[in-house]
Amino acid sequence: MMMATRFFTSLAVVLLVAACGKSTAPNEGSKPVRLQIFGDPAEITAYRELIAAYEKSHPGKRVELIPVGKQADHMAKLSTAFAAGNPPDLFILNFRRFGQFAGRGALAPLGPMMTADGRYKAEEFYPQPVEAFNFQGTQYCLPQNVSSLVVYYNRTLFKAAGVEEPKDNWRFADLLAAAQKIRRDTDGDGKTDIWGVAIQPTLIRIAPFIWGMKGALVDDLNKPSLLRIDGGSAVHAMAMVKSLVSDYRVAPGQADTYAEDADSRFARGGVAMLFQSRRYTATLRDLGSSAPDWDVAPFPLLREPVGVLHADAYCMAAKAASPIDAQAFVEYALSVEGQSLLAKSGRTVPSRISVATSPAFLDPVLAPKRA
């Protein structure tokens, strides 16, 4: 029975791929592919450059960019578009928000479609983001980037406080000690002007602390039914994060964060260390000479080394108006040329292994200088 189920499931996928691959939507070539993304101004500029390069190398093809500033607004706009039956052809999804679309059949299986004729080869990309966008054995979305949580630090503030810069094997105790030495009231009014560290109190930021303390978020990774953050190592980990604000007072609390977000505070030199993903690099590069002298350090070691995946992917709506042209754009965007263009912004770690290990990504001198 199981073999029969697998056979009919495979047959259904093959038929779906064949049907989509032979799509001949009337006048499709005359319609622009609509691509909806989210990001800050630096990220959006990078996507505009990618689209311009694609249109130049593909005469007659057009891509209409639909930029949205915040991910929450991006998700709301997508939900509204799908409810109205008019979703964009392509859109960027973070893998943490991928399941809700895949589970209700809103996505076209880009993986099988583009693998069939050799336009996508999974082995050329990092396996972690590839796996993240696989739902029940089908590759629906194709990963555009991969990243992890790191600590951005201000080298000038470290030097001024006489603190050694983080090493690859640094621990939470080292981070705390550095934060305590750097935090200070510069004008004597009793209020902190330079904070030691900043971290958003969200699950995606706190999760690696829980894992690093050998704790768990859920009862079963494969079939989660309960959150398991109410005892043991998970509580200890969350207490560590809380202590940065309440006990050691080296991190801004809720009121200070509402007054100025952590990203802005780091950019102006008001905090020495910031937990963020790779996407923040584009913002710092875009600041040019006004940006602080910064570098990055790995997540500090707790009981065991851990990381947390950050990845976005190109997804295509099951009812895309221009599916063939949409696939053509994804093919270019994920090519060596396309990923190299986006990599120069510093916004992401390319999902294509050859680009992530090339000067296009690794050499900051190649990053564009924008006014």
Image (cartoon, rainbow, N blue to C red):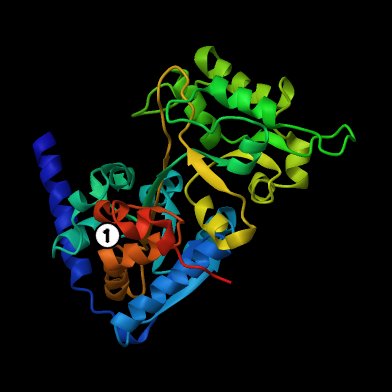
Out of 312 and 270, give the one closest to the viewer.
270
Question: How many numbered marks, from 0 up?
Answer: 1
In which image quadrant can residue 59 be found? bottom left
* Quadrant location, the C terminus: bottom right
| Crowd class of label 1 (few under 14; some 14 to 19; many from 20; radius 10 Å) | many
Q: Which of the 4 quarters of the picture holds residue 173?
A: top right
Q: Taking the image as drawn, is residue 33 in sight?
A: no
Residue 101 visible to the viewer: yes
Is 185 placed above or below 170 here?
below
Residue found at the far right of this picture:
189
Q: Residue at x 64, y 31 (%)?
A: 162
Of all residues, the one furthest to the top in this rendering is 232
Say if 226 sits above or below 113 in the image. Answer: above
Vertical relation: 284 (above or below) 310? below
Point 37% across, 67% down: residue: 341
Relative to 48, 118 lies left or right: left
Residue 49 spot, x, y in % from top left:
43, 73
Q: Position of residue 171 (x, y in %)?
A: 50, 22
Callout 1: SS: helix
Q: Amino acid at mark 1?
A: Leu
| Quadrant in which residue 203 is drawn | top right
Quadrant for the N terminus in the image: top left
Residue 222 in percent (x, y) is at 33, 29
Q: Residue at x 17, y 47 (%)?
A: 9
Q: Which residue is mark 1?
A: 110
Closer to the camera in the image, 98 or 208: 208
Q: Position of residue 293 (x, y in %)?
A: 58, 49
Residue nearest the observer in this picture, 234 or 306:
306
